[in-house]
Amino acid sequence: MMFSFLLIYYGDEEKRWNFEGSGSEGKEVFVRVDLNVPLDDNSNITDDTRIRAAVPTIKYLMGNGSRVVLCSHWAAQKVVMANDSIGEEVQKLVAGLPEGGVLLLENVRFYKEEEKNDPEFAKKLAALADVYVNDAFGTAHRAHASTEGVAKYLKPSVAAVANPKKPFAAIVGGSKVSTKIGVIESLLSTVDILLLGGGMIFTFYKAQGHSVGSSLVEEDKLDLATSLMEKAKAKGVSLLLPPMWLLPDKFAPDANSKLTTCEQFADSASHGNPDGWMGLDVGPDSIKTFSEALDTTQTIIWNGPMGVFEFEKFAAGTEAVAKQLAELSGKGVTTIIGGGDSVAAVEKVGLADKMSHISTGGGASLELLEGKPLPGVLALDDA
């Protein structure tokens, strides 16, 4: 069930399968979207990923004759169109929608009842429609009126359910093991291959007795890293660490850099790797190793970059993963980008539209991968 609910939010065919036969044609459909996008000091949108992620759902419902009522929160920003989220005037606007029409409600965060998941407020939201669709995965970990409460009063409340095809691989990156403990432990119960990248790998390498110079290491997580590697072995999971790193002499975009391996790094006298050097990206051999492993899979989920991809000089590993996943998607492999920096990476290289599913919910993605129950998902009929 781990990936059952990513599919409705960011899929294409899977999403349509569930809508077909749901009885939404010609009816009012209440769609919880996530339009909470970042703004600069002049209130210009700096990243419209979440808005674009909602478009396929809206277009599909419009094309099938639904009257679409969109609901979202947006920090403290005012939105136009409907002047309220509930009430008689909003009901009149909904009633006046033609088939295929769309209405955007006022920011639900203006109501304290939203975050309190007030039943009466949820019932008033539900009174606007016949069907409920939650397309705001980034808010599904919160039990709010528009994510959990409204589902109690609208039937059907839909989600798509699917099991990952095997072999199943997960790519987990990021700077610290501590932020991904729950994710890794949960994935070890389901994946066939687990690829680790980013700064967290050096905690694993040090736990194996390797020298890692000034690379990021969580000293208090060395025993945990050892335990996770032992669990992977016991469960038959192929856990792969990058065999080669790219080492800069400082944390900066213009740093000098060199390639090295664990063995070379340990022999600092012969290979000139002073303790002050740190790993900020995976090397070509690592990319090759990961690529060969991913070529054997049918389902891949990716959460976290391979290195400091914000610096162009150290973005090669992350960009290589993005490009391979896009290529594999074209061959029928299901590729799921699990939020946060991974989404930013595929956006950066212009490949977001090539992936099977993209989750714009960072915190919710992590909680789902950790196996935690999400109120906005559990409330759905098909959960």
Image (tube, rainbow, N blue to C red):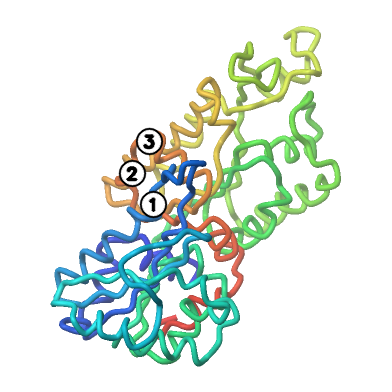
Q: Please name the amino acid that badge 1 sits on.
A: Thr
Instruction: Name the mark on residue 335.
Output: 1
Mark 2 vs mark 3: which is more N-terminal? 3
Instruction: Name the mark on residue 328.
Output: 2
Does residue 208 appear in the picture of this structure? yes
Residue 364 spot, x, y in % from top left: 55, 63
Is the C-beta separation of discs 1 and 2 under 8 Å? yes
Mark 3 vs mark 1: which is more N-terminal? 3
Question: Label 3, label 1: how many angstroms apart (C-alpha)?
Answer: 12 Å
The residue under the point 22% across, 82% down is 24
Q: Please name the amino acid that badge 3 sits on.
A: Lys
Q: Please name the amino acid that badge 2 sits on.
A: Leu
Is the C-beta separation of discs 3 and 1 under 8 Å? no
> How many numbered badges does the structure rendering display?
3
Q: 219 above or below 121?
A: above
Secondary structure beneath dot 3 equals helix
Instruction: Name the mark on residue 323.
Output: 3
Question: Label 1, label 2: how many angstroms apart (C-alpha)?
Answer: 8 Å
Residue 299 spot, x, y in % from top left: 41, 55
Picture quadrant where residue 183 is located: bottom right
Q: 285 above or below 106?
A: above
Q: 381 above or below 193?
A: below
Crowd class of label 3 (few under 14; some 14 to 19; many from 20; radius 10 Å): some
